[in-house]
Amino acid sequence: MPDRQPVKPMEAAFLAQVCKALSHPARIRILIHLLNREQSTCGDIVALLPLAQSTVSQHLNVLKAAGLVTGEAAGRETRYRADRALLARFGGFLRSMLGDGERRCRKDRQPSPL
């Protein structure tokens, strides 16, 4: 039986909020874009994705509400950054939910010697 850590109600709510924010492919692409850069503007993201500026802004607002992204005003623009600490926390919860089961699965997936 894997050693899975119990998830407290507050942790479950946090996980659900982050999963919901990541439930759209455009938001995942925006987050990956921000993880690959120190910061980015909405205009930079619009140039990357085939979406209108208003749509990108809506996606950024969802990511901000979940805490995945922060925005800092810089004159007339806002500079967005991925919150790496929150993502690390999210990853830690996922790892604790998987417990030893994932480690056992990795051992089972060893390539066969041919």
Image (cartoon, rainbow, N blue to C red):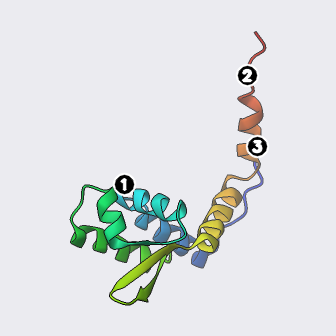
Name the one closer to the observer, 109 or 33.
33
Name the one closer to the observer, 43 or 69.
43
* Residue at the spot of label 3: 103
In screen coordinates, is 43 left or right of 13? left
Identify the disc placed on residue 111: 2
Identify the disc placed on residue 54: none
Is the C-beta separation of discs 3 and 2 under 8 Å? no
Instruction: Give SS at disc 1.
Output: helix
Q: Is residue 35 visible?
A: yes
In the rendered structure, which amino acid carries the disc numbered 2? Pro
Q: Which badge, 2 or 1, is on the more N-terminal residue? A: 1
Residue ID at (77%, 48%):
100
Q: Residues within 10 Å of mark 3 (few under 14, many from 20)?
A: few
Residue 53, percent from left and from top: 24, 70
Instruction: Give SS at disc 2.
Output: loop
The residue most toward the front is: 75
In the rendered structure, which amino acid carries the disc numbered 3? Arg
Is the C-beta separation of discs 2 and 1 under 8 Å? no
Q: Looking at the image, is mark 1 or mark 3 nearer the viewer? A: 1
Residue ID at (76%, 43%):
103
* Residue at the spot of label 1: 25
Query: Which image quarter is the C terminus in?
Result: top right
Name the one closer to the observer, 83 or 76.
76
Report the Cα–Cα distance between label 2 and label 1: 32 Å
Residue 26, percent from left and from top: 34, 58
